[in-house]
Image (cartoon, rainbow, N blue to C red):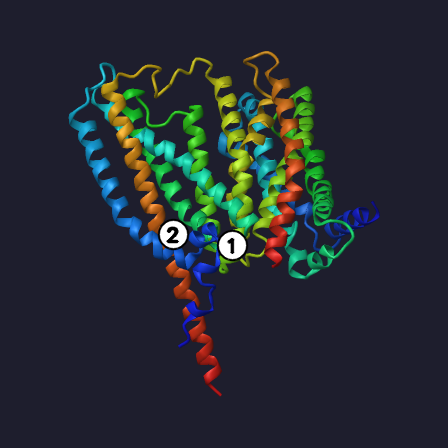
Amino acid sequence: MKPFLAVLTRDMKLATRIGGDSLTVLLFYIMTGAIMPFAIGPDKDQLAQLGPAIIWISALLSLLLALDRLFRMDHEDGSLLAMRQASLPLEMIVVAKICAHWVTTALPLIVATPVLAILLNLEIDQTLRVIFTLLVGTPALICFGAIGAAVTVSIKRGGLIAPILILPLSIPTLIFGVSAVSSGAIANAQDAALLFLAGFTLLSLVFTPFAAALALKMAAE
Amino acid sequence: MTESKSQEPTPQDLGFFSRIAHPGYFLEWSRYFIWPLVGIAAILMAYGLYLAFFNSPADYQQGETVRIMYVHVPSAWLSQFCYAIMAAAAIGSLVWRHPLADVSAKAAAPLGATFTAIALITGALWGAPTWGTFWEWDGRMTSTLIMLFIYLGIIALWRTFEDQVRAGRIIAVITLVGAINVPIIKFSVDWWNTLHQPASVFRLDGPTMPPSILLPLFVMFFAFSFLFLLLHFISMRTEILRRRARAIERQYAQQLRTQKP
């Protein structure tokens, strides 16, 4: 447990100190959400209807933006090679890094969601529901992002390719995340979507560490 | 100029599977399969097209546009079969680290993307007169579109790596992750779609088909499968030769460097 916590605290410190870009990602999230009304128009009812979708899309794009720093710096300065010699298996190190990344990137977005909800004219219970689905769904997004980041870690100019790989894979998360908030057509459909979202997150948490660690090992050879 | 072939193990030392999968030996034996495959694919394709165009009835509802199906359905099938081949090759390159598996996966990706694109385009052309629209966010069409995105992402990834041997193993990881995800994506898209349009009855395949339509479909199905096999063989051979050429170039460049003082 001790090495796990060490990696976790190390990554969180790195993310919050100078050069960390948690705040930039947060600003990007708010700005992406706030820029949508300029394209859609300031009609309040329409915005309230589209609000959950806008928030989810903004979160997805912001998380994609932050993805590149998950493994790249550690790969380039050799920390990842050192970590492979640790008593902790690389899979657990990946888990620790994913946890730290979620806390420093996704959690600030979720905390700032009420600001966007006010801008988009969402009601309070809907806002709470969006926050809850983001809490459940963002780990899955980060997991897929981790696989994409691990696969592209050895490419010198790989910043643009990772989102291309990850976006198709994150479609189920988006579908279930948004329909867990707003799908009024069928009774219980929201709860069903929420359960699917939770299941999907758990599934991705199970297989991501192995896939990402495998890709990292291959990249280091 | 040293002959690089002399350092490789001779085919007699290896087991049967290692022997046929050895890249150099693969080049040898696959040579004899190319022209027979060309013949089979050409005959089947000609016969299938003849049946499809001249010897099958027009549908009583869809009219002549039903003939698009003879191209559409085989390519839609191949778009999924091709991913299965890539996933199998991915296991081969991760477990046995086999160079031929890398080559097979790399050669299959553009073929799969092409067949997926053909399926989408023919589907759109068929949909315009039949449904009155080129595109509908129908579950099947949407998941095929996502499949195309996954193929294009993998092709783009192949093109960004310099070291193709390392690329093979890394891309195998994302191919397998995609293989786990494809059923989930398909399921989620169907679920999403039925929420929005519960009365979606767009089905290409009726439950019963008369044999006059089924026969050309079968022939075209085999024609496309053999065409895929042929193209896969050819592009695997091309890829092996390209890698050899690159290795020889690198060797030559090193020789030049050591000769100079």
Residue B74, percent across and down?
A: 33, 32
N-term-proximal mark, 1 vs 2 = 1
Around disc 1, counting alpha carbons within 10 Å, would you say few (fewer than 14), some (14 to 19), or many (20 or more)?
A: many
Residue B255 placement: quadrant: bottom left
Give the residue pinned by disc 2.
Answer: B236
Instruction: Please identify, in this view, whether the residue under mark 1 or under mark 2 is nearer the observer.
Output: 2
Q: Quadrant of the N terminus of chain B?
A: bottom left
Question: Which residue is found at the position 65% from the left and 57% from the top?
Answer: A75
Vertical position of residue B15 compared to residue A181: above or below: below
Query: Where B124 sits versus B170, above or below?
Result: above
Question: What residue is at 45 percent from the left and 24 percent from the top?
Answer: B139
User: SS of the residue at dot 1?
Assistant: helix
Residue toward you, B70 or B5: B5
| Residue kind at label 1, given as amino acid type | Ala
Left or right: B227 as drawn, with respect to A156: left
Camera-nearest residue between A188 and A117: A188
Q: Is residue B26 above or below residue B151?
A: below
Whether residue A51 appears in this view of the structure is no
Residue A220 appearing in the image: yes
- Chain bearing tag 1 is B
Q: Position of residue A27 (x, y in %)?
A: 64, 43
- Binning the other alpha carbons within 10 Å of mark 2 as few (below 14), some (14 to 19) or many (20 upward) gives many
Q: Can you tell which mark lies on residue B167?
A: 1
Residue at 41% from the left image edge and 36% from the top image edge: B81
Which is nearer the eye, B197 or A31? Answer: B197
Real-space Cα separation, disc 1 to disc 2, in angstroms: 16 Å
Q: Chain of mark 2?
A: B
